[in-house]
Amino acid sequence: MQWETVIGLEIHTQLLTRSKIFSGAPTAFGAEPNTQACPVDLGMPGVLPVLNRRAVELAVRFGTAIGAEIARRSVFARKNYFYPDLPKGYQISQYELPVVGRGAVEISLEDGSTKTIGVTRAHLEEDAGKSLHEDFQGMTGIDLNRAGTPLLEIVSEPDMRSPAEAVAYARKIHQLVRYIGISDGNMQEGSFRMDANVSVRPRGQHALGTRTELKNLNSFRFLEKALAFEVERQVEVIESGGAVVQETRLYDADRDETRPMRGKEEANDYRYFPDPDLLPLEIDTAFIAAATRDLPELPDARRRRFVSQYGLKDHDAGVLTASRELADFFEEVTEVCGEARLAATWVMGDLAAALNRTALEIQGSPVDAAMLGGLLQRILDETLSGKIAKQVFEAMWAGEGTADEIIQARGLKQISDSAELEAIVDEVIAANPKQVEQFRAGKEKLLGFFVGQVMKATRGQANPKQVNALLRKRLQG
Ligand code: ADP
Ligand code: MG
């Protein structure tokens, strides 16, 4: 039997607001436990939630970026469940009428093709607090700082057909929320968390199989591994005559397996009803226009522009637009040096390698775009050979100054002075009469030997083009 995998993702992304979605308490990460939760977040009786305008703006930005319909009227609902870190006994979310309706994103697949993944909806809700299972004399601690932090839950259609597609989609959403500035996407701090729904069905069958839900995956690698394990497990269950049980499972990274966590709750278990403390959310055209006025050029459009404007390969344009900061950096380097392809080579090559080596993000690069552009200018005007430029780059990285300062201080200027080069070429020719004879007898390959000798004599600083020309002239003359 041939099996087909079906995956749909629910992604929770924390929105970059200063205060909570229904209270004025701060949202900053990392404060002492229970110092950033006010009576509203604590679910005290008699308090009233007030909707944070900024959270709505950020949701609208997202909806616009994925080409979705923005609901002119949406409703907050209570989702009732008990959890120790949910003191109200319900979570305020959106249910029947979410603020963002149907949209789509495009993902790039390994084979270079693209695929459209539908986004069913995205709704605003509040985050819960956090249970801390570290050692509190055998007890669990509760930190309610996170309670009430605004979340946008982004729900996809079951459009993905492999773990790799699911990762491509998740990466796309992650890229997008950071590009448009609605979330920092920090996965270590829980700002971007993924739930993966997965089922299998016989290839050719239209109806969906029974799914399981893998909760709270916080890295793309775990997402891929958890899904791969789960697909294999489901196929084994079915092939050995069993049936997949609809349930929520947890991925254990240490053992690389998923385990049941709880039976799947149905929507009616939550007793959703419109929150009587909040009016329906009404959004007009002016609000949408204001919220989206400063949306930047989106990653797909920018990637296409990099191909058409700079003549880059689509793959390279994809790498360079992975984050807004990287794309900005590349464009600034290009502007300074005037040569997009050289800029692309260096940003994806030596710069990326150095960032990787030091585990730095582009924002933290000790070599900024102006400095790298300055170095590339010295390659383009033939002050530096490519090889020496790499040395200058390393020196810039180490904080020795700009390219020009380093060239000056180290005396690295490429020798392009023809009189000076001529003298060196003549010396090399005089010192190797046997090779000169062989060359003149037709052994043209020896030109490389002579070039090497001149480079050695100049410690790599001779302009290779000029050396070649001079050698040919002198040897053939
Ligand atoms: P719930 O109410 O349990 O959250 P939804 O219908 O909202 O369920 O779906 C949640 C996610 O699960 C969506 O991303 C959806 O695409 C996905 N999904 C639903 N059914 C399946 C299935 N049979 N196999 C894989 N994914 C599914
Ligand atoms: Mg759900």
Image: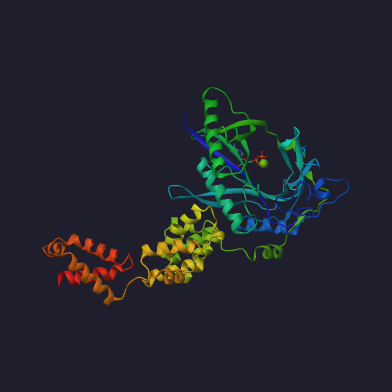
Between 170 and 4, the one nearer to me in the picture = 170
Q: Estimate the x, y position of residue 83 in percent, counting from the top left.
A: 76, 37
Residue at 59 percent across and 63 percent down: it is: 296
| Residue 474 vertical position relative to residue 244 in the rendered view, above or below | below
Residue projecting furthest to the top = 241
Residue at 53 percent across and 38 percent down: it is: 225
Between 383 and 320, the one nearer to me in the picture = 383
Q: Quadrant of residue 245?
A: top right
Q: Quadrant of residue 273?
A: top right
Residue 8, visible in the rendered structure: yes
Q: Quadrant of residue 17?
A: bottom right
Residue at 75 percent across and 59 percent down: it is: 53
Is 386 left or right of 90, judged from the image as shown? Answer: left
Residue projecting furthest to the bottom = 419
Q: Estimate the x, y position of residue 101 in percent, counting from the top left.
A: 65, 52
Q: Estimate the x, y position of residue 374 in percent, counting from the top left.
A: 46, 70
For the C terminus, the quadrant is: bottom left
Q: Estimate the x, y position of residue 257 in percent, counting from the top left.
A: 57, 32
Quadrant where ligand 1 appears = top right
Between 365 and 417, the one nearer to me in the picture = 417
| Residue 205 vertical position relative to residue 432 in the rendered view, above or below | above
